[in-house]
Image (cartoon, helix red, strand yellow):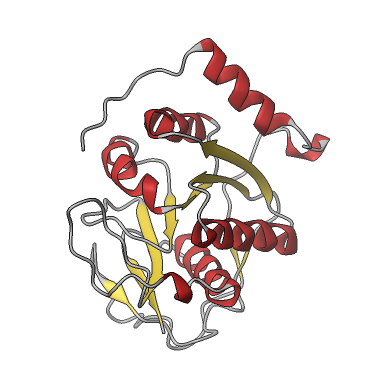
Amino acid sequence: MRFRLLPAGPLAVAVATAVLVGGCSPGDDWSRPHEKPTAVGTLGPGFHDPATPPSPEATITPRPRSWDGVHPSEGYRVVLLTAGKDAQTRTLVNAVTEWAQAEDVSLKTVTAAAPAEYVARISDAIDLAPDLVISAGNDLVDPLALVSANHLDQQFLVIGAELAEPTANVTAADWTGASFRGEGLGMSSAYDPATFTPERAGRAVRAGVSAVLHGLTGIVIWLD
């Protein structure tokens, strides 16, 4: 499947703006000056081996709850990029939303409703200049593989899936049963929708964000 980067038309931009602005408080005005985010707290023992940092595209299996002490700094800006109405994607979206509320993160959502919109919606998410774009939905994996490599200054976190050959700005958090890597590519485990539980999705979000905040990017975080 091939994708071509096209600018979003006036109508698409207007629709995206309406979705993004609706419901935002004054504190969600991203046009204001913004300090570089930092990690509040440190990774616990067993998240990774500090003496041997993971190499690009490596897979690590952190010790459970080793990320619990890590939180984003105040004003952390995240775009939730999502596509698909299946139960698995809805579980991932809910996990990101609940995490953002618990951490007082400034969250905006960009939704791609059809394949023809995928690349344009990714561009919309990047244009918002967030600290992190979190992707939820297998349909976005192939378009992300195309677009993310051309925007190395933007950090991405893919939950419940992964890119086959991620660049250093794309981190993934998945588990046995959730390792879609793109159309026509093999998976490291059999796909199992039943594994997409709210608890596991929540762990993926927290572990993935903790890794990004500590500069451990371009890797796959494998959850038990």
Is residue 177 found left or right of 44 in the rendered image? left
Is residue 40 found left or right of 53 in the rendered image? right
Quadrant (top left, top right, bottom left, bottom right) of the C terminus: bottom left
Residue 54, placed above or below residue 82? below
Can you give x and y, in whole percent of width and height, for residue 212 in the image?
A: 46, 60
Can you give x and y, in whole percent of width and height, for residue 13 in the image?
A: 55, 19
Residue 108, placed above or below residue 119? below
Nearer-the-camera pick, 95 or 126: 95
The quarter of the displayed image where residue 110 is located:
top right
Nearer-the-camera pick, 180 or 170: 180
Can you give x and y, in whole percent of width and height, for residue 95 in the image?
A: 61, 63
Q: What residue is drawn where x is 43% and y is 29%? A: 117
Residue 140, placed above or below residue 173? above
Q: What residue is drawn where x is 81% and y is 38%? A: 25
Nearer-the-camera pick, 12 or 66: 12
Can you give x and y, in whole percent of width and height, for residue 65 in the image?
A: 55, 84
Quadrant (top left, top right, bottom left, bottom right) of the N terminus: top left
Q: What residue is drawn where x is 43% and y is 69%? A: 193
Residue 129 in sight: yes
The quarter of the displayed image where residue 50 is located:
bottom left
Residue 73, placed above or below residue 49? above
The quarter of the displayed image where residue 173 is located:
bottom left
